[in-house]
Amino acid sequence: MIIAGEASGDLHGANLVKALQARDPEIFFCGIGGRALRQAGARIIVDASQLSVVGITEVLSKGFSLLNGISLAKQLLKSLKPDLLILIDFPDFNLHIASKAKKIGVPVLYYISPQLWAWRAGRVKKIKALVDHMAVILPFEVDFYRDHGVSATYVGHPLLDGEAPLPCSNRDHRSAHAVVIGILPGSRDKEVIRNLPAMLSAAAVIQRRMERVKFVISQAPTVEKDLMDGIVAGCDSGVDYRVTTDPVSDIFKECSLVIAVSGTVTLEAAIWGTPAVIIYRVSPVSYWLGRALINVKHIGLVNLIAGREIVPELVQQNASPDNIARVVLDLLADNGRMEAIKAGLVEVRGILGGAGASDRVAEIAMEMLKSQ
């Protein structure tokens, strides 16, 4: 049984399913996920798009769906009693399911750690009690868990398992006719609602101040098309844009820079060597509660891994259209700064290591299955 509640987890879960199927084609997979897991052959009982939320107050708007998903997952766990439960990120939901698994004797492999080192570190006690093994994707996480007595293995980052990006120096992001800027508004409806209007307004400012510029807007598969269409239709008519559902890697290949909502996609941009401006806007209540709980200096994974600010971050009121436009225009006008950012991104990619995360997790899963 496998549970991935968000778009990135769905993709990484699908790659893990494929790696396990390569080792044993008879393994049956079911659980919670999205299109990628379904295409990989997993039987999905709840679609992840019904569960994905962002921010503390936003949880309330999907409260019924979350509770219903937890109930269905627990029922499936009890009736099926799988040989292994694989949980992917999505901690507040997944730890409920881990608790049920513990009670009925189902071993738990947790792949992609909650960011306990950033906030709510006390949850490590719950993980120690409920999880048999952690497969972590950031190098410093393994020491965090081992220091707390949790069995953990660093497997590398699954984003490196895909198509190998070309080094920054070997790619020319500028098309023959214009500078291309990517807009990545997030994989959740609430993220898009909170962030895309400001991003589009910033695009309008950039369009007025810069010659020959185009925008590519990414629509994640977990975001409602009508929602995206409605927000984009209300943007400034002077913006030269297109909306795409293509993989974000295709966007990175053609862009000089991306404006991205904080999340896994910003690390993917780093792996592709594409400079970014990271923004993040949530509800005021979520923001102030978050400020009280979060104990790290940066919100972007790129900057967290590097231990310093490599790419700019604009959070909450600082993520205004004028501020976003100003930072983007300043970067594009400063070749030295852009090259420094690209060098920093190469450094981050080096820290993450090479490909093979899915295979490493599959080996751990197979060992856990054999030990039953």
Image: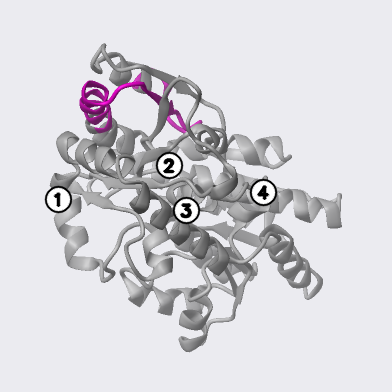
Q: Residue at 26%, 13% (x, y): give it.
A: 238
Q: Secondary structure at mark 2?
A: loop
> Which residue is identified by label 3?
267
Q: Which label's residue is closer to the chain start, 1 or 3?
A: 3
**Image spot of residue 304 (x, y percent):** 38, 66
Q: Secondary structure at mark 4?
A: loop
Mark 1 or mark 2, which is nearer to you?
A: 1
> Which residue is identified by label 1?
285
Q: Nearer the viewer, residue 8 or 285?
A: 8
Residue 56 visible in the displayed image: no
> Which residue is identified by label 4?
164
**Image spot of residue 21 (x, y percent):** 81, 51
- Give the quadrant of residue 132: bottom right
Mark 3 or mark 2, which is nearer to you?
A: 3
**Image spot of residue 52 (x, y percent):** 41, 43
Mark 4 or mark 3, which is nearer to you?
A: 4
Say if 141 sits above or below 55 in the image: below
Q: Which label's residue is closer to the chain start, 1 or 2?
A: 2
Mark 4 or mark 1, which is nearer to you?
A: 4
Distance from the alpha carbon under mark 2 to that under mark 4: 31 Å
Quarter holding the C terminus? bottom right
Distance from the alpha carbon under mark 1 to that under mark 3: 27 Å
Residue 349 visible in the displayed image: yes
> Which residue is identified by label 2?
51
Region rendered in magenta: 199-227
The disc at residue 169 is: none
Say if 240 sits above or below 110 in the image: above
Residue 173: say if magenta: no
Q: Which label's residue is closer to the chain start, 3 or 2?
A: 2
Residue 217: say if magenta: yes
